[in-house]
Amino acid sequence: MDLDEVWRTIDTERASLADLLDDLAPDEWEAPSSCDAWRVRDVAAHLTLAQMGPAAALVSTVRARGSFNRMIRDTALRVGPLPDVEYGHRIRAMVGSRRTAPFVSPLEPLIDVLVHGQDVAVPLGRERAVPPAAAAAAATRVWEMSFPFRARRRLAGFALTATDSGWRAGTGAPVEGTTGDLLLLLTGRTATVGRLSGEGAELLRSGRRPGDRRPRAVS
């Protein structure tokens, strides 16, 4: 994907996610998301911060004592609670803008909206398609990053192959699935591991790695 296509996809995904949020029932806002210890409301709050400025990011990092994960969670919690309609409104307001948070490429907001869209949709049983080409671009970026996902280390010994695009990575026990489901796996989500196939997928479901004799939890 070229840069214009990346941004067009981000705009489309933000608009459709805002539509999904507008459609949520009151109890769905408080439901657990696929992010550990995050409610659907917390995920939506995090997505409203995709264009956080440098000063706010610096203050939040200092408050979190340099912990990236703590900073992300704390900033999301400080957003709300907002009126339910406000989350979709704020996300929709970013459509057409190419502004990013400090020190990230345009691929990070693409990863964010694709993955967090599923963090909301999957546990609620909502259908939300993941565009294969966009998921492939996001998956490549995640695979190349050492932080924060550490996908290469976590998934060493597995050969990942997408069934709806040409994306593939790694060597070892085969794991096959849609590019969207592989993207979720790369970013540490396990909610859709049951949709993956292959010897490697069986190992992941049992909490084991290639060569392991004892069960090991997937993280």
Image: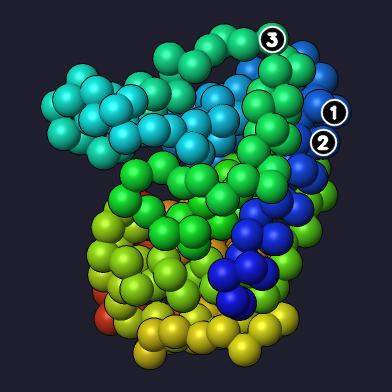
Is there CB contact under 8 Å for labels 2 and 1? yes
The residue indicated by pointer 3 is 83
Q: Does residue 92 appear in the picture of this structure?
A: yes
Report how far apart the C-alphas of labels 2 and 1 lie in the structure: 6 Å
Residue most extreme to the left: 65
Quadrant hosting residue 54: top left
Identify the image quadrant of the N terminus.
bottom right
| Residue occupying image coordinates x 66% and y 27% | 90
Name the side, left or right, on which 68 lies relative to 37: left
Q: What residue type is labelled 2?
A: Asp
Q: What residue type is labelled 3?
A: Pro
Residue 51 in picture, x, y percent from top left: 49, 37
Residue 26 in picture, x, y percent from top left: 77, 14
In this rendered view, identify the residue nearer to me: 106 or 182.
106
In this rendered view, identify the residue nearer to me: 117 or 10.
10
Report how far apart the C-alphas of labels 2 and 3 lie in the structure: 15 Å
| Residue occupying image coordinates x 46% and y 75% | 140
Residue 207 in picture, x, y percent from top left: 40, 61
Q: Which amino acid does label 1 sit on?
A: Asp
The residue indicated by pointer 2 is 19
Structural crowding at the residue carrying mark 2, measured as other residues with C-alpha within 10 Å and reported as few (<14), some (14–19) or many (≥20):
some
